[in-house]
Amino acid sequence: MKRKLQLRTKTKVKLRTSVKLAYAGAALSVMLVAGWLMYSNFGTSTDSIANEQTTLPDFNWRRKLSFSNELVKGGETLLNFPLLIQLSDPEFRSVANGGKVVHPKGYDIRFTKADGLTTFPAQLDAYNPKTGELSAWVLLDTLSEKSVKELYVYYSNATIRNELPNILWSDAYRGIWHMNDLNASNNRKLRATVLGTSEVNGKIGTARLFDAARQDAAFFPYAEELDLKTDFSLSAWVYLNETNREQVLLSNQSDRPGGYRLFIGSDTTLGVDFVNANGKRISIAAVAGGEQLEKDRWYYLAATYSLKDNLIHTYVDGLSDRNLSVIDAPGITASALQIGRDQFNAKTYFTGVLDEVRIATQARSQAWLATELYNQTVGKRLFTLGTSEELHLSAASIKRNKDGLNQQDTETQSQQEKANTLRGRKVSSAGEAPMTLTSSAEAIQARMENIRRVAAKENGK
């Protein structure tokens, strides 16, 4: 009996050892294969090497980006134009997913002028690290038929830890809502109080669905910058789910004088009005005509008011809709901005989807609005990516990248430890043994690639 018991114990120990070795061998094989695939992807590039004097420091890669002259609609020169750039390429995936973008949220993506050095103000609207798809707003100081239609996109920089400072919308824009949430995307950080709404697919990324039956809406505390008393532009992408009644898209009118409003009339035409200092309403609804809007399709709707021209004007899909000569201006109001309803009027709740809602203190031209429409409709078909350029890094840049990688690794480890602790507490409270979370294969592979890439550049110096 003793011999049998001893024999079984030895067999059990051997089996356990074999299983451990098998697991270890399999893990090592996976890591070696992953490492080889990554080395093949990054280490055998035949792309061109850019001159250090014409590149941004600390970046490993860049690509030229060009777009066609057909983007510009009309013969005007558009100043401070926010260009929507939509790209999809395997190189823009994160390193954990076989790409070359170091930060998992795409923070190390930058855009420059054709000189390769002058950085454009930009905002990354959406980034998918698994597919390499990205959408970014880039502020062009000049856009015209004669202006340069080339820029550079830079990526792969471990020294960048945070997203770009949001200075893109600080010129004439008073509120920009991309509608992935209902907080304004500008330096003013206007925070909404949201009543209902839900996230849905939009014209650009995600948008917000409003339902009048649920009384969905959003409103903001009074902000002086939204109390427009001179030139303005109001615009939005709109998808109607209901017609034949008045529906308000945005408004800061109340039961007092002053304020402006963008709405869909009961006759399904686009309307805009404002109330002057004496409480008189000036409305384009008094003008005959206007395109009849339909359900179940997207429209790019805009309205402008020009104090200089004494004119209010509506546009549907970049085309002139109606205009009205006026001698009045919007009066001062202390009312809060509403999106999706008119204050004190429960019958004007909006039913449909809103995307890219904007308020500006300039009367945008038809050329501007038509260019926006084309840019945001055609999307990624507008742009052509050039070949990848592997950039020369100085010894100081290599050190900064290494330090950045170490910092990123420390932050990841700290976050993991916090997650382990939290999970341990949750499991312990349930009466079970705490579990320890280990690094994912993607995180390990990403770390391996980061180290290999920076080390390879240092060895090549």
Image (cartoon, helix red, strand yellow):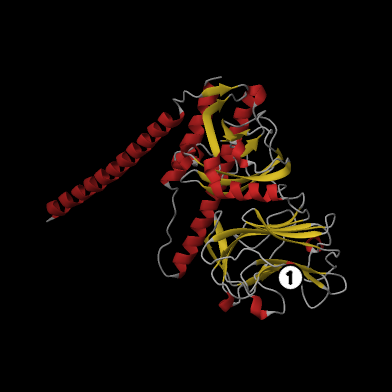
Count of marks placed on residues:
1
| Image coordinates for residue 425, horizontal then vertical, percent | 49, 64
| Image coordinates for residue 19, horizontal then vertical, percent | 26, 46
| Image coordinates for residue 227, horizontal then vertical, percent | 81, 64
Q: Residue at x 83, y 55 (%)?
A: 309
Q: Residue at x 51, y 57 (%)?
A: 419
Q: Depth check: 455 or 123 in front?
A: 123
Q: Residue at x 76, y 72 (%)?
A: 253
Q: Is residue 138 visible?
A: yes
Q: Is residue 159 visible?
A: no
Question: Compared to 75, does 178 lie above or below?
Answer: below
Q: Does residue 442 appear to the left or right of 411 in the view shown?
A: left
Q: Quadrant of the N terminus?
A: bottom left
Question: Compared to 43, does 95 lie above or below?
Answer: below
The residue sitting at the front extreme is 288
Q: Depth check: 439 or 165 in front?
A: 165
- Crowding at label 1, few (<14), some or many (≥20) Cα neighbours within 10 Å? few
Amino acid type at mark 1: Ala
Image quadrant where residue 361 sits = bottom right
The residue at which mark 1 appears reads as: 286
Looking at the rendered structure, the secondary structure element under dot 1 is: helix
Q: Quadrant of the C terminus?
A: top right
Q: Residue at x 59, y 72 (%)?
A: 196
| Image coordinates for residue 240, horizontal then vertical, percent | 56, 67
Q: Does residue 19 appear to the left or right of 215 in the view shown?
A: left
Q: Does residue 365 appear to the left or right of 101 in the view shown?
A: right
The residue sitting at the top extreme is 461
